[in-house]
Amino acid sequence: ARVNNFLQRIASVANRRRLLPVGRKILVAVSGGVDSMVLLHALHQLAPQNRWRLSVAHFNHQLRGKASDADEKLVCSTAKKLSLPCFCERGDVAGLARRLKISVEMAARTLRHEFLARLAKREKISIVALAHHADDQVELFFLRLLRGAGGEGLAGMKWRSPSPVDKAILLVRPLIDFPKPELLDFACKNKVRFREDATNSSSDFLRNRIRNELLPLLRNKYQPGLDKTVLRLMEIVGAESEFVGQTARRWLECSAERFDELPVAVQRRVLQQQVNQRGIHVDFDLVEQLRTAAGKFVSVGASIAVARTTDGKLLCREQGDQEFKAGELAFELSGRAGRAKLAGTEFHWSLKKFNGTRRRPIRRTEFFD
């Protein structure tokens, strides 16, 4: 009965949220972990009554050697057992991370979404089902909180959103309200085979430390109902952020009020939206510099500067290459420490033995191997 209830809730959510319309082709992203394997089996059981035509997509990140290959093998064999088409692709995630100087997680996400969008377009599928669940939402909230995200970021993932690669492709998350224990319970009762990702227990990634260290501490010592509280907060913040965003868009289309008479939250979003439209990386400091000083240009790259007019519109101008002031100083790193001066700036240096621990960033300090 509990299994049937689980499937009924997914069907209800899919219908109520307009995630998976009847009779449509759906591409299911499957990693081989419990979340995506449960999603695949649940949608497969619900497919006949909804006339869904499912296909399976698996992206091999090649980060865990034979373990990654075993994930791919499990996904392919499961799809074959369920008589579903299966599409697999491999990508050099670690290589991309090194080339672009981005995190492994960001590189993996980039390649994975490119694969899903490319495959969906080729197969003429406009809906991709992802297996994010409630625990993912809570982890994402704290991940973004620690990185200083605003309302849009703290709202977390939506039930449905356009692909970051192709806006014509819709990403849907039917399990976003389901906690992980429910997924494990379904897997156990339905004998769903899945593989554990050993990197989930590694403390190298911030998300893993949030999952394995911070959240258990908060649940045990501070708030047993943490997940429910955070999910409710995300919904509130998300709704308020959406309202601010809509208000900002309406103001940009028809500036009925003076910019400096708008609420501060709307002023920020007006500037943020304009900066985003120009493909410029936006952060809080940039928005505040623009918001608090009309007409003052701020450099946002080697050759671009932006400012806002008194009526809140963004100005963009190219600036010539800044002349490089050449200067060099050569000296011997003799002894254990010392100081030197270059172009009026004094710096101190010291030699230290590296003990293998991760160095925390320190203002105005650089570490060299």
Image (cartoon, helix red, strand yellow):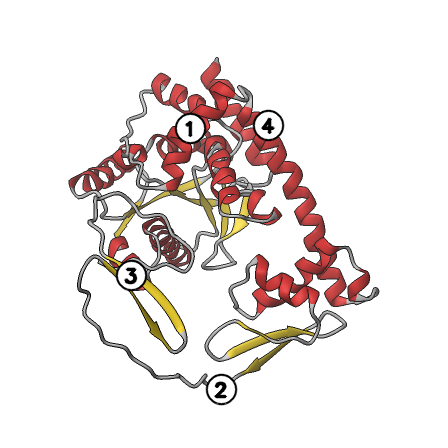
Q: How many marks?
A: 4
User: Local crowd at mark 1 within 10 Å, few (<14), some, or many (≥20)?
Assistant: few
- Mark with earlier residue (2, 4): 4
Q: Amino acid at mark 2?
A: Gly
- Mark with earlier residue (3, 1): 1
In the displayed structure, would residue 23 be above or below residue 263?
A: above
Q: Amino acid at mark 4?
A: Thr
Mark linked to residue 229: 4
Mark linked to residue 349: 3
Q: Nearer the viewer, mark 1 or mark 4?
A: 4
Q: Position of residue 219 (x, y in %)?
A: 49, 22
Q: Residue at x 47, y 19 (%)?
A: 220
Q: Position of residue 359 (x, y in %)?
A: 31, 48
Q: Nearer the viewer, mark 3 or mark 1?
A: 3
| SS at mark 4 in the image | helix
User: Local crowd at mark 2 within 10 Å, few (<14), some, or many (≥20)?
Assistant: few
Left or right: 33 as drawn, with respect to 214: left
Q: Residue at x 41, y 60 (%)?
A: 364
The residue beneath circle 2 is 320
Q: Give how far apart the Cα atoms at labels 1 and 4 are.
A: 32 Å
Between 256 and 27, the one nearer to me in the picture: 256
The residue beneath circle 1 is 45
In the displayed structure, would residue 347 be above or below residue 110?
A: below
Q: Position of residue 291 (x, y in %)?
A: 68, 64
